[in-house]
Amino acid sequence: TRVFLSRSLDLIPLSLSPSLHPTQSTPDLLARLPTFRSFTRPGAGLALTLLSAASPASLPPPTAAFLFDLTARNMAPLYAASGFGWDPAAKARELRHDDARFLLAFHTADVEDGSTAAPPALPSTALPVAFVHFRLEMEGGAATLYVYEIQLAPAVRRQGLGKFMMLAVELAARAGGLGRVMLTVQDGNAGAARLYERLGYGTDPTSPGPGEGPGGGDPGYRIMSKGLIADGRVAVVSG
């Protein structure tokens, strides 16, 4: 059974139903993290606003289509070079899964100003430039935030945005009482692996080792995790 963050934490409601579906829509992920609403790099001409989405159904159709397109552009070559191959139908289903949650970055000029009572609405036609797809799951008997994707458009890379969005998700997880964040990185994605290592992630004990992949070969990927504790220090999960 997958466990979602409790409603009292203003993040994601608790659901122990067999369907694994949350019982109510997700409040704003950044409600407790207002400093993570904006990301600016004046020297690069970047002014971005971060917004959260409670489910794939809450995404405007152009945004939903863009998330798949960006993932395909960024990841299809890596998947094709691995032993898994690129399966666009499977990736589309993953992004449309009822348990999927999103943190998205838009150009601020494309976002209407929100009131103090509510965050800005998702733009109906403007497209994001980056997103994190995450879910809240049970891993090894512990409630865990699992990052499925973090994808950035080429124009906003190497500006610290990926690190910024990962930290926002981590802080939201910690505010919700979760003990760790997990993710999977492909062996061919060395840049992503370096980012995660700089952020304090290490190889999770559940990650398959050499010879533990299909047919006794290398798995082609690594499961990484990062422990979150109350005072903000990093504790890499170990066996």
Image: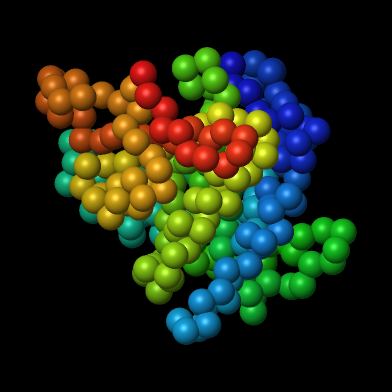
- What residue is drawn where x is 52% and y is 15%? 141
Q: Residue at x 57, y 33 (%)?
A: 229
Is 227 displayed left or right of 90 in the figure?
right
Residue at position x 39%, y 68% in the image: 157
216 to the left or right of 11: left
Q: Quadrant of residue 160?
A: bottom left
Describe the colour scheme in one phrase: rainbow
On the image, the x and y values in percent for residue 88 come to: 35, 45
Asked whether 170 or 137 is in front, the reply is 170
Among the 4 quarters of the image, the one containing residue 69: bottom left
Measured as percent of width and height from the top left, residue 40 is found at 56, 74
Tell me, yes or no, if residue 93 can be seen here.
Answer: no
Residue at the far right: name it. 117
Q: Position of residue 156 (x, y in %)?
A: 43, 71
Pick the quarter of the image with the C terminus.
top left
Query: In which quadrant is the N terminus drawn?
Result: top right
- Camera-side residue of 201 and 16: 201
- Is residue 198 or residue 29 the one in the foreground? 198
Horizontal arrangement in the rendering, residue 190 relative to residue 33 (left or right): left
- The answer to which of 226 and 138 lies nearer the viewer is 226
Question: Looking at the picture, does residue 33 appear above or below residue 11?
Answer: below
